[in-house]
């Protein structure tokens, strides 16, 4: 397993470097003047020269690239031109909203998707199975932002059970802050829960057709114990891989829904940075998301190695 994980670490490190090169190329090497983009067409020559110096645009491209990679290694994402403060501080402040939103959405996704998939597999071809498949198809078809608007109208405006938007802050009102995340988390979780339910169902059906599960059932093992204690653990490998992929989708979806629910997360930060042409913030947020995706992929690979005895025995995929 150590050899397998070492290979995954190397692959993820290469992924991070390639992503950093792509971000640098898009924002620094493409035709056009980033300083002119950030300051607008009315900027004076002195202001442009000062900003080019601050951004390092007056240095060769390879020097800028090496300097930026060194800053990334130290955790320095630069200084925002608009806010006049380190990008890392801005990102940490906004992650206090985006990260809990994504985690709550992930918890709802697993809570909805895995039991639904197990129930559908246990009742294959029956009414419950068909109903779960139909609901999951609807979940796949409904866009998250549209569902978010419907939830606002129903539970925020109509019933008044949950906040329709805004975020009071964790320190000021922890309960209100958590309540403000419930509707966007559910809007995020519906589509991903539908996907997870279908994958769980397929993995469970494959496991239930194995000889050892049929033998256990023939020996008199209870249906519930067979499903949850024997079949589900062996079906978790593809389910876990999907959950790892879903985390990145949930973060990306959270960025969109933060605009719908007026949440001060990474989505609002990126939107404001694009509007204000603050390319330093845009680049910093992208790299934070890349690092998050890389760490999530490594965690999933490590759990995969723990669950799959073949990887532990052979030390390779």
Image (tube, helix red, strand yellow):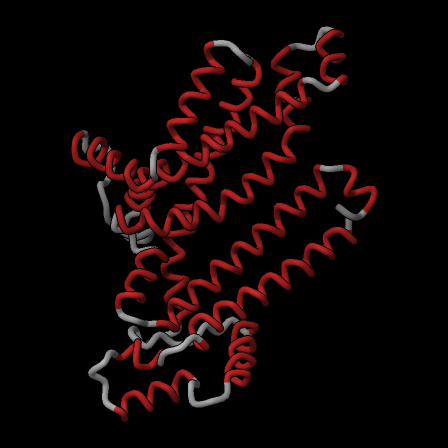
User: Residue placed at 74% from the left, 57% from the top?
Assistant: 6
Give the image location of residue 116, x and y in percent: 49, 23
The vertical placement of 313 against 207, above or below, is below
Residue 163 placement (x, y as % from top left):
23, 40
Count how many numbered circles sit on residues in the image: 0
Residue 198 position within the rendered picture, expressed as x and y whole percent measured from the top left? 52, 27
Residue with the most extreme left position = 158
**Up/down of 292 relative to 306, above or below:** below
Q: Is residue 235 left or right of residue 37?
A: right
Query: Looking at this rendering, what residue extends furthest in the bottom direction?
Result: 46
Q: Quadrant of residue 11?
A: bottom right
Look at 35% across and 81% down and name the residue there: 33
Q: Is residue 177 above or below residue 113?
A: below
Viewer-nearest residue: 258 or 195: 195
- Residue at the front extreme? 31
Front-most of residues 161 and 219: 219
What residue is rendered at 42% in x and 40% in y?
Answer: 105
x then y, percent, for residue 162: 25, 36
Nearer to me, 305 or 182: 305
Q: Kindly tell me whether residue 159 is visible in this rendering.
A: yes
Left/right placement of residue 204 relative to residue 186 reads: right
Image point (76%, 18%), residue name: 212
Q: Does residue 167 appear in this view?
A: no
In-front residue for pair 289/159: 289
Q: In this view, does 148 lie above or below 235?
A: below
């Amino acid at each position: 397993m150590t050899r397998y994980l070492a290979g995954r670490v190397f692959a993820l490190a290469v992924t991070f470097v390639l992503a950093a090169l792509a971000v640098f190329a898009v924002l620094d090497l493409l035709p056009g003047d980033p300083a002119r983009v950030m300051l607008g067409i009315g900027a004076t020559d002195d202001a442009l020269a000062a900003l080019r110096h601050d951004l390092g645009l007056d240095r060769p491209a390879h020097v800028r690239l090496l300097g930026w990679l060194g800053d990334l290694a130290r955790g320095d994402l630069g200084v925002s031109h608009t806010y006049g403060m380190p990008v890392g501080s801005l990102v940490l402040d906004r992650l206090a909203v985006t990260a809990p939103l994504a985690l709550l959405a992930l918890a709802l996704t697993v809570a909805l998707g895995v039991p639904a998939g197990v129930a559908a597999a246990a009742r294959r071809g029956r009414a419950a199975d068909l109903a779960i498949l139909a609901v999951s198809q609807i979940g796949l078809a409904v866009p998250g932002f549209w569902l978010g608007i419907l939830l606002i109208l129903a539970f925020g405006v109509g019933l008044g059970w949950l906040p329709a938007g805004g975020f009071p802050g964790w320190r000021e009102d922890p309960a209100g802050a958590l309540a403000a995340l419930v509707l966007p988390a559910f809007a995020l979780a519906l589509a991903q829960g539908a996907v997870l339910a279908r994958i769980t169902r397929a993995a469970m059906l494959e496991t239930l057709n194995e000889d050892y599960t049929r033998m256990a059932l023939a020996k008199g093992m209870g249906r519930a114990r067979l499903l949850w204690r024997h079949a589900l653990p062996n079906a978790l490998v593809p389910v876990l891989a999907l959950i790892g992929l879903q985390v990145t989708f949930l973060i990306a979806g959270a960025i969109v829904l933060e605009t719908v629910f007026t949440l001060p997360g990474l989505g609002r930060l990126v939107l404001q940075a694009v509007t204000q042409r603050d390319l330093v913030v845009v680049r910093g947020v992208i790299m934070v998301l890349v690092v998050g995706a890389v760490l999530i992929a490594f965690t999933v690979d490590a759990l995969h190695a723990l669950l799959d005895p073949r990887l532990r025995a052979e030390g390779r995929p």
